Image: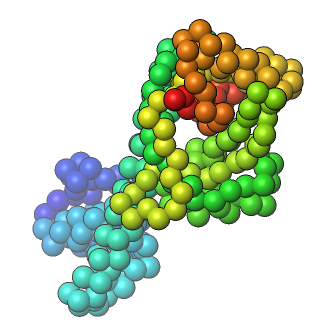
Amino acid sequence: MYTIGQVANFLGVSRDTLKFYEEKELVKPKQDDHNGYRKYNHFDIYDIMTINFYREIDVEIKMIQDIRKSMSVKDIEILIEDKEQKILEEIEQKNLLLKRIRSVKADCQNIKQYLGGYTIREMEPLEVKGELTNFASHDEYTILQNDTDHLKRAATLTGLRRIISFNEEGVVRDRFVVVSKVEDDTEGEVLTYPKCIYMIIEDGRWLTGGENIDGQVGDSLRSIAAENEYELLGLVYINTVITVYEDGLERAFLELYAPIA
């Protein structure tokens, strides 16, 4: 027989937890008639270990009480299978979150390396999932929410691309599309270019005071193309990678892919 202190020590639970289990009639240790001390036998310890397991997988106290009263092996199997499915879904969400965290980490490295400079790189294939009327069309963000690449179907901007079409006279078309990575069963429009001028620029009210910088970006791209004899294809794909704040004003860092021939 063991005291409450001994059980709490080697099972790694508090005395209050053991008393709570007793109040809920989940465990019923014997009490010494002379001093009222609880005495736990090995069956009580087995019960506590079992209760701890159910609590670790978020089984409610009421359900544990039902299990303690009467539940068949089949009932337990159904309960465990349900918990298994929920845990698998949580793991999937955690993996998506980890993927997003690593993506932001890579974005930070790109900003440090390419802000104020450029390189030539491929724009990886992206499938177009939908289009927004404009950036501020919040009532259309269900397109973003329905993109299963996003965590818990939240409306985030990681799958949104601004596409500017231009010629020598200026901007011809400006649109926003929702994209995702290309899968094996992709049937929609796919955006991909083997060679692009890739650069990171800064936007936001801290730097620009709210002024539009499209003209500056266009001049910069034309200058790079002229100096290196690149032929611009009249498109720029823009993605917001990170937004930070300075004196309460946003500093938005954007990555640009400008396809070249």
Image point (66%, 13%), residue name: 223
Q: Please tell me which residue lies in front, 233 or 125.
A: 233
On screen, residue 161 above or below 8: above
On screen, residue 67 above or below 253: below
Q: Please tell me which residue lies in front, 119 or 261.
A: 261
Q: Please tell me which residue lies in front, 50 or 23.
A: 50
Using the rendered image of the protein, determine whether residue 98 is visible from the camera's viewpoint. yes
Image point (73%, 17%), residue name: 219
Image point (65%, 51%), residue name: 177
Residue 135 is left or right of residue 221, and the answer is: right
Q: Where is residue 68 shown, x and y percent of the image?
A: 30, 82
Q: How is the image coloured?
A: rainbow
Residue 100 is left or right of residue 32, and the answer is: right
Q: Where is residue 7 shown, x and y percent of the image?
A: 22, 56
Residue 115 is left or right of residue 183, and the answer is: right
Image point (73%, 47%), residue name: 175
Q: Where is residue 52 shown, x and y percent of the image?
A: 30, 63
Quadrant housing residue 235: top right
Q: Where is residue 178 shown, x and y percent of the image?
A: 62, 53
On screen, residue 33 above or below 130: below
The residue most toward the top is 227
Quadrant where the image shows the N terminus: bottom left
Using the rendered image of the protein, determine whether residue 35 is visible from the camera's viewpoint. no
Q: Please tell me which residue lies in front, 23 or 32.
A: 23
